[in-house]
Image (spheres, rainbow, N blue to C red):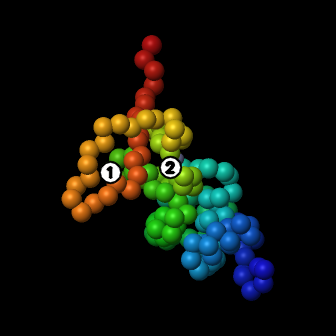
Amino acid sequence: MDAGIDTMDAAAPSSNALERLRAAGLRPTRQRLALIGLLLGNGDRHVTAEQLHAEAAAAGVPVSLATVYNTLHQFTDAGLLREVVVEPGRAYFDTNTVDHHHFFCESNGMLRDIPARGIAVSGVPVAPPGTAIRRIDVIVRVGPQSL
Ligand SMILES: [Zn+2]
């Protein structure tokens, strides 16, 4: 099944990675395979483009930060990832694409999942004319406990 795909030794993509790309309608280029392999290799994760770029470099995958950004956005558009913008200019890419919420620690950047059923949202206003609510994601901001 992998015949004809030139895989990279440094970050050997699993057949799962290949299947995920194909199911999402994305051509399995070497860079996409390497990056999706890094993303999916460790369970549910929240990574920034900078973190993934550093992981790619450590794994011997030659890829620019701009390409990492572009690829992460392509994965997000294809439904493989979900983007979590915690503040302007600061986004995490989430490999958990089922509905859920997050704790975000503003002092150390920790982002942790909260199951969708863990937060009840009520009193949601009617969506503006011509729009429909797609989803609601809540970010609960935390900091160190003061003594
Ligand atoms: Zn998450």
On whether ligand 1 comes within 8 Å of the CB at mark 2, the answer is no
> In this orientation, does residue 4 appear?
yes
Question: Left or right of 30: which side holds 85?
Answer: left
Residue 83's spot in the image, x, y percent? 45, 56
Q: Which residue is mark 1?
A: 88
Residue 104's spot in the image, x, y percent? 45, 38
Looking at the image, is 131 positioned above or below residue 64? above
**Residue 29's quadrant in the figure?**
bottom right
Pick the front one: 74 or 47: 74
Q: Secondary structure at mark 1?
A: loop
* Residue that extends furthest to the left in the rendered view of this protein: 129
Going 51% across and 64% down the picture, which residue do you hit? 79
- Check the picture and name the quadrant holding the N terminus: bottom right
On whether ligand 1 comes within 8 Å of the CB at mark 1, the answer is no
Q: Are marks 1 and 2 in contact (CB under 8 Å)?
A: no
> In this orientation, does residue 48 appear?
no
Residue type marked 1: Pro
Residue 64's spot in the image, x, y percent? 51, 70
Residue type marked 2: Asp
Q: Secondary structure at mark 2?
A: loop
- Closest to the camera, between mark 1 and mark 2, is 2
Pick the front one: 100 or 126: 126
* Residue that extends furthest to the top in the rendered view of this protein: 147
Between the C-alphas of marks 1 and 2, the distance is: 22 Å
Mark before the other along the chain sequence, 1 or 2: 1
Q: Which residue is mark 2?
A: 99
Going 68% across and 52% down the picture, which residue do you hit? 42
Pick the front one: 102 or 98: 98
- Check the picture and name the quadrant holding the C terminus: top left
Looking at the image, is 120 positioned above or below residue 49? above
Residue 89's spot in the image, x, y percent? 35, 53
Question: Left or right of 29: which side holds 85?
Answer: left
